[in-house]
Image (cartoon, rainbow, N blue to C red):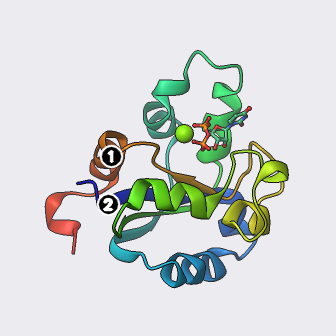
Amino acid sequence: MSNRTFTMIKPDAVANNHIGPILAKINEAGFRIIAMKYTRLSPELAAKFYAIHKERPFYNDLVNYMSGGPIVAAILEKNNAVEDFRKLIGATDPAKAEPGTIRNLFAKSIDANAIHGSDSNENAEIEGSFFFSQTERF
Ligand code: UDP
Ligand code: MG
């Protein structure tokens, strides 16, 4: 699975009409879409998705924010997908994200930071499976 990663276009980016421009950046960077859906996380599902962060001070705000509006979830394919996608999205804090990265271009704050990218091959598989069954991957 080392050639696949998982992403979400987060509620702030969806609300600000950034779905199209963000997908264009993802395609221009050479990623192929394997699965994609426009959906919304319940608070319970957002809490489960981010359970790894439950001891961190921003956890409750993160769960409220991620369940506060629709998102776009997708599995993406490219050589070295996880690492290359993290480079494409930039640092967690958009103020520290490199020029031209998705968070530099489309995010306003460290909490509402436009996009998610898996941080390891193992988490890419876990997170992709959270949203998509085998028969939804093309
Ligand atoms: N987050 C936040 N405050 C922080 C750090 C993170 O609100 O100080 C949020 C932010 O939306 C981030 C998510 O929690 O994308 C997950 O944090 P992580 O450290 O895993 O950052 P990422 O992997 O998304 O860059
Ligand atoms: Mg992370």
Q: Is mark 1 within 8 Å of ligand 2?
A: no
Q: Secondary structure at mark 2?
A: strand
The residue under the point 79% across, 66% down is 99
Quadrant, the C terminus: bottom left
Quadrant, the N terminus: bottom left
Q: Secondary structure at mark 1?
A: helix
The residue under the point 75% across, 60% down is 98
Mark 1 vs 2: CB contact within 8 A: yes
Indicate the position of residue 124 as horizontal and vertical percent values.
35, 48
Q: Quadrant of residue 56?
A: top right
Q: Is residue 122 above or below residue 57?
A: below
Q: Label 1 neighbourhood size at 10 Å, few (<14), some (14-19), many (20+)?
A: some
Report the Cα–Cα distance between label 1 and label 2: 7 Å
Q: Is residue 45 above or below residue 32?
A: above
Q: Is residue 51 above or below residue 126?
A: above
Indicate the position of residue 108 as horizontal and vertical percent values.
83, 56
Q: Quadrant of residue 93?
A: top right
Residue tagged 2: 4
Q: Amino acid at mark 2?
A: Arg
Q: Is mark 2 within 8 Å of ligand 2?
A: no
Q: Label 2 neighbourhood size at 10 Å, few (<14), some (14-19), many (20+)?
A: many
Q: Mark 1 or mark 2: which comes first in sequence? A: 2
Q: Which of the numbered marks, if any, corresponds to residue 101?
A: none
Q: Quadrant of ligand 2?
A: top right
The residue under the point 33% across, 53% down is 131
Q: Amino acid at mark 1?
A: Asn
Q: Is residue 33 above or below residue 86?
A: below
Judge from the rendering whether residue 106 lies leftward or rightward of residue 48; answer left or right: right
Judge from the rendering whether residue 20 lies leftward or rightward of residue 85; answer left or right: right
Indicate the position of residue 29 as horizontal and vertical percent values.
52, 78
Residue tagged 1: 121
